[in-house]
Image (spheres, rainbow, N blue to C red):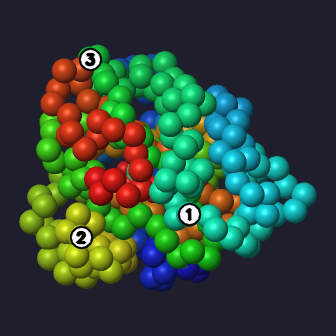
Amino acid sequence: MKTLSSNGLPLPFTPDLFAPLRDSTDLYGRPDALRERLASDGYLYLRGVLDRAEVLRLRGAYFSLFDPAYLAPGTTPEEGVFSGRVPDGLPPHGMPGHPAHAFVRSRTFREFVGSPVLAKLAEAALGGSAELLPRRILRHFHRGAHRASRAHVDLDYLDAGSDRLVTMWIPGGDCPLEAGALVYLEGSHTLRADEYAPLRATSDRPHDRRPITHDLELLATRLGRRWLWADFSAGDVMVHVPRMVHASVDTATDAMRLSVDIRFLPAGAAADPRWLRAWSADDGA
Ligand SMILES: O=C(O)CCC(=O)C(=O)O
């Protein structure tokens, strides 16, 4: 049995705790069917929606912004393989001065997230015209950091606007589970917040009430639900609803984990004002 971890806590990869995501790629291009599936499952797992080469170009453009010492000798920025050494003086991820901060403000990134393919998918998911929120997050983790996203629902971060939003999570390269993939708690979009509220007592960030917990095994066991997973490839797109509980596992591969997450609202719906500015890791949102 393999054991994963999330934020440094062990997470056994067992059938009690894990099950595969349902693949909805066959519904692609059928907006009504996609919307129905999103409502029933809380997520859509769509393979190969984006051009793989375009995603890898984005990956290469990002990793080429770093000191080459960050990348393993003989590898390309597109591969994004960690050398095992974080360059001296690199600011914390996403803070001003870190490449991710400039990258989310770049034309390359703007064009990527502004893809008509994503806009069309958002329209299908929302059932009408959609607007992309300006706060777009680039996440990047490397092996050994023992850092991942804690279990949470997006609504706890976006509760000052309409709840009629959808999130897209886009792996910036191949992202098998061990590379630090996103995992979804099955059927969790139908849970009431008070059903998982007691789990908030077990948190490595007690000062922050938004994450539910960093203990993914505890959450799954207490709620009797499994974490849904996939080995993602460059070009895949996940769509999820704002009450779906999700998290990620620690990166255990040499290839670094890169992803983009973006949110869409129905055109004209009230947007949370914190999401109307470009993302910075210190923006508190
Ligand atoms: O990429 C991650 O680890 C977290 C992403 C996320 O929470 C989201 O897309 O809503």
Note whether 40 is above or below 266 in the view shown.
below
Disc 2 element: loop
| Badge 3 density bin: few <14, some 14–19, many ≥20, Cα 10 Å | some
Horizontal and vertical percent for residue 244?
27, 52
Note whether 283 is above or below 89 in the view shown.
above
Disc 1 element: loop
Query: Horizontal placement of 231 versus 276: left or right?
Result: right
Horizontal and vertical percent for residue 63?
69, 50
Q: Residue at x 60, y 30 (%)?
A: 108
Please state which of residues 138 and 238 is positioned toward the viewer in this rendering. 138
Please state which of residues 5 and 26 is positioned toward the viewer in this rendering. 5
Residue corresponding to mark 3: 128
How far is the residue under mark 1 from the one under mark 2? 23 Å
Instruction: Determine which quarter of the picture holds residue 120.
Output: top left
Please state which of residues 247 and 276 is positioned toward the viewer in this rendering. 276
Horizontal and vertical percent for residue 167?
35, 40
Task: Specify the amino acid type for callout 2.
Answer: Asp
Instruction: Determine which quarter of the picture holds residue 7.
Output: bottom left
Residue corresponding to mark 2: 208
Task: Specify the amino acid type for callout 3.
Answer: Gly
Query: Horizontal placement of 140 versus 164: left or right?
Result: right
Marks 1 and 2: which is nearer the front?
A: 1
Q: Earlier in the sequence, mark 1 or mark 2?
A: 1
Note whether 28 is above or below 151 in the view shown.
above
| Badge 1 density bin: few <14, some 14–19, many ≥20, Cα 10 Å | few
Note whether 191 is above or below 46 in the view shown.
below
Q: Earlier in the sequence, mark 2 or mark 3?
A: 3
Disc 3 element: loop
Residue corresponding to mark 1: 91
